[in-house]
Amino acid sequence: MAAALISSGCTSQNTDIPADGSLAEDATQKTVKIGVVPWDDSRASASVFTQVLDEGGYEYETLSADPGALYQAIAQGDIDVLIHAWLPATQAAYWEQYGDKLNKAQIVSSGAKCGLVVPEYVPINTIEELKGNASKFNNQIDGIEPGAGIMHNTESCVVDYNLKEFELYSSSTVGMVTKLQDKINKEEWVVVTLWRPHWSFARMEGLKFLEDPQGSYGETDDLIILTRNGFEEENPEFYQLIQNFEMNLSDIESIMIAIDQGQTSEEAAAAWLAENPEKVDEVLGTQE
């Protein structure tokens, strides 16, 4: 498990500590380990949250891994916080396996959605209509990393809709989006696993979710910060910061677009916070 988690940072060491030492004693007596799924939506919101933590002088360490590894790590107590889970639909399998050892601490955003997406020029509107048109898609559904919840749901979708002529192709998120853009440039048929918030909806005009009457992908998801059992009791101050944190899907997407345009997640989050300084006070609980 330790090999699967990649450490990617901790707090600034230049944070001013109050003269009475209260912050150092209360907030930094233990480094909080935060797991971040290496997808742009998680990286965007996590970068905002951790930069607010920097402002408050809180000590933390971020670690990156695929969702399955992070769910296992937090259930085992190897990490304290996970930003963020897609529940109840997309990561239902992970919640079923580990949920009794986890706590839903905060809903960051609501209305997230996963499913199969095609360009608008493809003249079908439901997943059922994929049948009979497999050859036009080269008999392929283009997916992302095999450990992702949306891939598990798509495997179920293939069974639910009897899409036996299709092969679900595992790739990377970057590889999937690159192929999607290439197909759009050529106005060729393509169907991909995709979700919102995602910057591709802003960069590529004319994408549409295929209707899912069987409910293979569920309805909509909440983006949720999870904590391990017992974390609230052990670190109530940090837990309150988590409960103070929320973002609109549109704000997360705006940061994701900046990342896609070449900024690091830290740079994009810093620019967003510069335009939304009230978020720092909101999370730290220092609003007047």
Image (cartoon, helix red, strand yellow):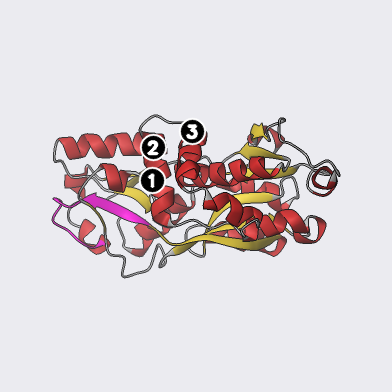
Instruction: Name the residue that disc number 1 marks.
Output: 254
Which residue is found at the position 42% from the left and 65% from the top? 220
Instruction: Name the residue that disc number 2 marks.
Output: 258
How far apart in space, not on screen, are marks 2 and 3 (Cα)?
Answer: 9 Å
Q: Confirm or deny contact between disc 2 and disc 3 (CB under 8 A).
A: yes
> What amino acid type should be assigned to the residue bearing mark 1?
Ser
Q: Nearer the viewer, residue 108 or 91?
A: 108
- The part of the image, by quadrant, that contains residue 140 is top left
Which residue is found at the position 60% from the left and 61% from the top? 106
Q: Position of residue 169 (x, y in %)?
A: 36, 41
- The part of the image, by quadrant, that contains residue 12 is top right
Image quarter hosting the C terminus: bottom right
In the rendered image, is residue 39 in sight?
A: no
How far apart in space, not on screen, are marks 1 and 2 (Cα)?
Answer: 7 Å
Looking at marks 2 and 3 on the same chain, the residue that comes earlier in the sequence is marked by: 2
Q: Position of residue 227 (x, y in %)?
A: 68, 56
Which residue is found at the position 68% from the left and 45% from the top? 56
- The part of the image, by quadrant, that contains residue 102 is bottom right
Residue 264 forms part of the magenta stretch: no
In the picture shown, does residue 111 fall above or below 168?
below
Q: Nearer the viewer, residue 166 or 192?
A: 192
Q: Confirm or deny contact between disc 1 and disc 2 (CB under 8 A).
A: yes
In the picture shown, does residue 56 fall above or below 7?
below
Residue 117 forms part of the magenta stretch: yes
Query: Element at badge 2?
Result: helix
In this rendering, the count of numbered labels is 3
Looking at marks 1 and 3 on the same chain, the residue that comes earlier in the sequence is marked by: 1
Instruction: Name the residue that disc number 3 marks.
Output: 267
Magenta residues (range)? 114-126
Query: Element at badge 3?
Result: helix
In the rendered image, is residue 63 in sight?
A: yes
